[in-house]
């Protein structure tokens, strides 16, 4: 991997979030497992940019300021994603990622989210990046895969 190429981390939406009144960067606002792993190990990964999926399934930069919003429902895992919402988000995310991924700036993309949320993303292969998307095992093995990816396999 050439040193000029960066890596992109796409975090899925999180039910857990910080309740601070003032807007916080997306990476700070959400407090789910993958966000906590990312915050802990990002300092070791100088070549990683972060993008977060928000409640409407669209992507924002990890440093985009977000106001606090109550999560929908009582449990995230039970949340149903209407196909119209997925399609709308997929179009918005395609534009967002086209802008991010053009010029071959990134060598790989790591998806830290459930399969349901990944349906709101366009086909990333067409952008010519390697996609890492751990889908087996529960949150633990996926969080470990994220940690390994961020720390370069330490």
Image (cartoon, rainbow, N blue to C red):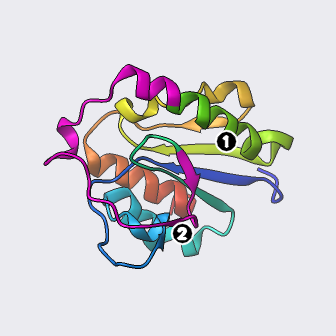
Where 59 sits versus 61, above or below? above
Q: Which mark is residue 96?
A: 1
Residue 97 figure quarter: top right
**Nearer to me, 17 or 4:** 17
Q: Is residue 36 left or right of residue 15?
A: right
Mark 2 secondary-structure assignment: helix
Q: Is residue 145 left or right of residue 8?
A: left
Q: Residue at x 66, y 44 (%)?
A: 108
Could you say where residue 102 lies in the image, as x and y percent from the top left? 81, 40
Does the stretch in magenta take in 93? Answer: no
Q: Is residue 138 left or right of residue 13?
A: left
Q: Residue at x 54, y 46 (%)?
A: 59
Which span is picked out in magenta? 59-88
Label 2 Cα crowd, 10 Å radius (few <14 / some 14-19 / many 20+): some
Which is closer to the viewer, label 1 or label 2? 1
Could you say where residue 110 lies in the image, as x and y percent from the top left? 54, 45
């Amino acid at each position: 991997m050439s040193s000029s190429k960066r890596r992109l981390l796409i975090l899925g939406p999180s039910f857990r979030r910080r309740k601070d009144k003032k807007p916080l960067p997306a990476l700070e606002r959400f407090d789910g497992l993958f966000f906590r792993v990312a915050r802990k190990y990002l300092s070791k990964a100088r070549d990683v940019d972060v993008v977060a999926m928000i409640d409407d399934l669209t992507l924002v930069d990890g440093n985009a300021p977000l106001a606090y919003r109550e999560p929908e429902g009582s449990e995230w895992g039970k949340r149903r994603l209407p196909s119209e919402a997925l399609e709308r988000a997929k179009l918005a995310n395609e534009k967002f990622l086209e802008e991010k991924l053009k010029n071959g700036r990134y060598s790989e993309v790591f998806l830290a989210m459930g399969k349901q949320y990944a349906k709101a993303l366009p086909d990333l292969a067409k952008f010519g990046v390697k996609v890492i998307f751990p889908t087996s095992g529960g949150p633990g093995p996926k969080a470990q895969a994220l940690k390994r990816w961020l720390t370069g396999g330490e």
